[in-house]
Amino acid sequence: MTHDPNRPVVLTDYLTDIEARLLIGYLEELGIPAFHSGVGGSTGWPDAAGYAQVVVRASDYDQAKRGMDEFVAYRHPDGA
């Protein structure tokens, strides 16, 4: 089986669509194509959590991971 560099891989999950889209916007500013996968998304019930996945190409995964780490460090400088 050959390795497809364009294969979509999940970078991370977020509890809200908004958080996922903020990261996607940041990654795209860095030149990394990313998209939102609604897998497991909101159920419509406020007490039933869903999740939103951020997906990137396999070939961009390492760079996207570094970008995500920068994004998280900027949003949560105290480590919380």
Image (tube, rainbow, N blue to C red):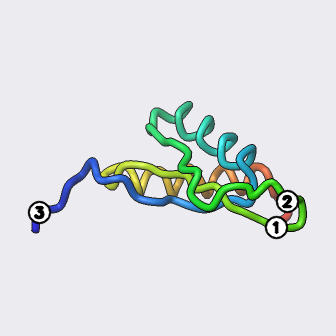
Q: Earlier in the sequence, mark 3 or mark 2?
A: 3
User: Label for residue 45?
Assistant: 2
**Circle 1 crowding by C-alpha within 10 Å: few under 14, some 14–19, many from 20:** few
Residue at the spot of label 1 = 48
Q: Please identify the quadrant where the N terminus is shown.
A: bottom left
Q: Position of residue 51 (x, y in %)?
A: 68, 61
Is residue 71 placed above or below 43 in the rendered structure? above
Residue at the spot of label 3 = 2
| Circle 3 SS class | loop
* Amino acid at the residue labelled 3: Thr
| Circle 1 SS class | loop
Query: Decide: marks 3, 2 in contact (CB < 8 A)?
Result: no
The foreground one among 46 and 17 is 46
Q: CA distance from mark 2 to mark 1?
A: 5 Å
Q: Earlier in the sequence, mark 1 or mark 3?
A: 3
* Amino acid at the residue labelled 2: Trp
Query: Decide: marks 2, 1 in contact (CB < 8 A)?
Result: yes
Q: Position of residue 39 (x, y in %)?
A: 56, 57
* Amino acid at the residue labelled 1: Ala
